[in-house]
Image (tube, rainbow, N blue to C red):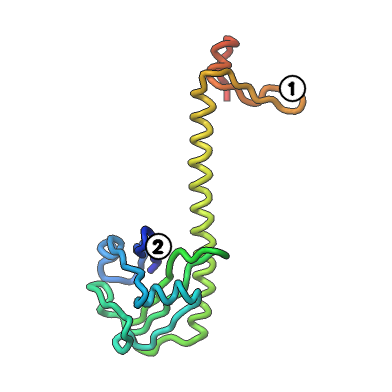
Amino acid sequence: AILLRQNGNLRVVAARGFDDVDALLQQSFDAVEDSLFFRVMNERQAVVIDDVRQHPDWRDTDHTQHVQGWIGAPLMTQDDVFGVLAVDSRQPYSYTNEDAQVVTTFAHQAAIALANARLVEKLQVAEARYARLFEDSTDMILIFDYQGRVLEANRKACELLCREKTS
């Protein structure tokens, strides 16, 4: 499962291998100091739990009753831990430190992909805002290249110059 930090909680945004994935995707968990999620995020490294039933910080839910072994790895960029990648097993003592290293590597790759997706989303929002401001301006706006050719003209410029807007 992939859990992302949102408003102080961790929300499940992706999951596989659970009986009711759709219901799990509606779940969020407190990232309180005594939780395993908090530990993973605070320590910035993977945590391996051999048998969750024996661990005092494990919080069972309707969706995790089958879990016995667990690895949690932080999803982080250089300066921000923004989630946890959790890998479960139905068997206790399933995971080794080498498994934790593999999960950590995957978590780093997933964190890069998620961070890039966030940046693309921000860029798209900024581009849409720029386009609205450019097109809806009450002033004529022309953008030229170094040779003096018009690269862009807003709606008002086309109207005042009696020209059609072309792509």
Q: Position of residue 9 (x, y in %)?
A: 35, 63
The picture quadrant where one finds residue 3 is: bottom left
> Which residue is at a point 49% across and 53% down the rendered structure image?
118
Q: Position of residue 53 (x, y in %)?
A: 29, 86
- Kind of residue at disc 1: Gly
Q: Is residue 145 above or below residue 99?
A: above
Q: Position of residue 114 (x, y in %)?
A: 49, 59
Percent x, y of residue 112? 54, 62
Mark 2 vs mark 1, foreground winner is 2
Element assignment for label 1: loop
Query: How dense is the environment of label 1, judged by Cα within 10 Å: few (below 14), some, or many (20 and up)?
Result: few
Residue that carries the numbered disc 2 in the rendered image: 5
Q: Is residue 102 above or below residue 160?
A: below
Extreme residue toward the front, this view: 33
Q: Quadrant of the C terminus?
A: top right
Precedes in sequence: disc 2 or disc 1: 2
Q: Which residue is mark 1?
A: 148
From this view, report whether residue 124 is shown above or below residue 66.
above
Picture quadrant of residue 18: bottom left
> In this view of the protein, which residue sits in the foreground, 72 or 34?
34
| The label number, if any, that marks residue 111 in the structure image | none
